Image: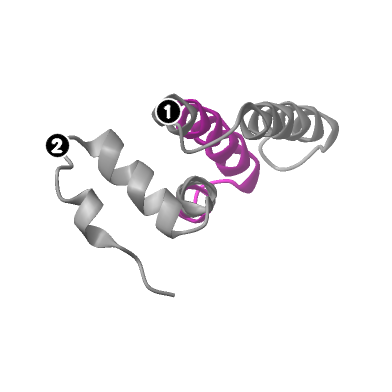
């Protein structure tokens, strides 16, 4: 696939650069960024407690999905999906009794 890169020579801000990168990635750049940051947060914070790591990672996922939606890299359905995941993780963490005694 050959791209005409001469039309992208006047990019002046990060929003334009990310929009062009998202176009080149086939619309999957925002989803990839969201997944990498969420799983990275989960891996770093699960060192302390897996339930708290899951809650924190899903909360960071909500914040990142809002930010990426503001930049135009994600649709609203991914923001709602991140919010639903956060609610599910909160409910599951309350239902599972573990060593940490709740959250």
Question: Does 3 lie within the magenta span?
Answer: no
User: What is the quadrant of residue 6 in the picture?
Assistant: bottom left
Taking the image as shown, residue 37 lies to the left or right of residue 21, namely right
Taking the image as shown, residue 44 lies to the left or right of residue 94, namely left
Taking the image as shown, residue 75 lies to the left or right of residue 34, namely right
Residue contact at pointers 1 and 2, CB within 8 angstroms: no
The quadrant of the rendering that contains the C terminus is top right
Question: Does 46 lie within the magenta span?
Answer: yes
Question: Real-space Cα distance between discs 1 and 2?
Answer: 19 Å
Give percent across and percent down for residue 64: 46, 34
Residue at 37% over, 42% down = 19
Is residue 81 shown above or below 48?
A: above
Type of colouring:
one colour
Query: In the image shown, does 11 or 69 lie closer to the viewer?
Result: 11
The residue at which mark 2 appears reads as 12
Of badges 1 and 2, the one in the foreground is 2
Give percent across and percent down for residue 41: 47, 47
Residue neighbourhood size for the residue with mark 1, other residues' Cα within 10 Å, grouped as few (<14), some (14–19), many (≥20)? some
Residue at 49% over, 29% down = 69
Which stretch did the figure color magenta?
39-67
Residue at 25% over, 60% down = 5
Give percent across and percent down for residue 90: 72, 28
Give percent across and percent down for residue 93: 75, 34
| Helix, strand or loop status at disc 2 | loop
The residue at which mark 1 appears reads as 67
Residue neighbourhood size for the residue with mark 2, other residues' Cα within 10 Å, grouped as few (<14), some (14–19), many (≥20)? few
Q: Residue furthest bottom?
A: 1
Query: In the image shown, does 10 or 57 lie closer to the viewer?
Result: 10
């Amino acid at each position: 696939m050959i791209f005409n890169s001469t039309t992208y020579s006047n990019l002046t801000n990060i929003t334009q650069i990310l929009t062009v990168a998202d176009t080149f990635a086939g619309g999957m750049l925002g989803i990839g960024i969201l997944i990498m940051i969420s799983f990275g947060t989960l891996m770093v914070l699960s060192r302390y407690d897996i339930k708290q790591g899951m809650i924190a990672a899903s909360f960071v996922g909500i914040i990142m999905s809002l930010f990426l939606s503001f930049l135009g890299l994600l649709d609203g359905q991914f923001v709602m999906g991140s919010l639903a995941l956060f609610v599910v993780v909160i409910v599951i963490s309350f239902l599972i009794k573990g060593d940490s005694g709740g959250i």
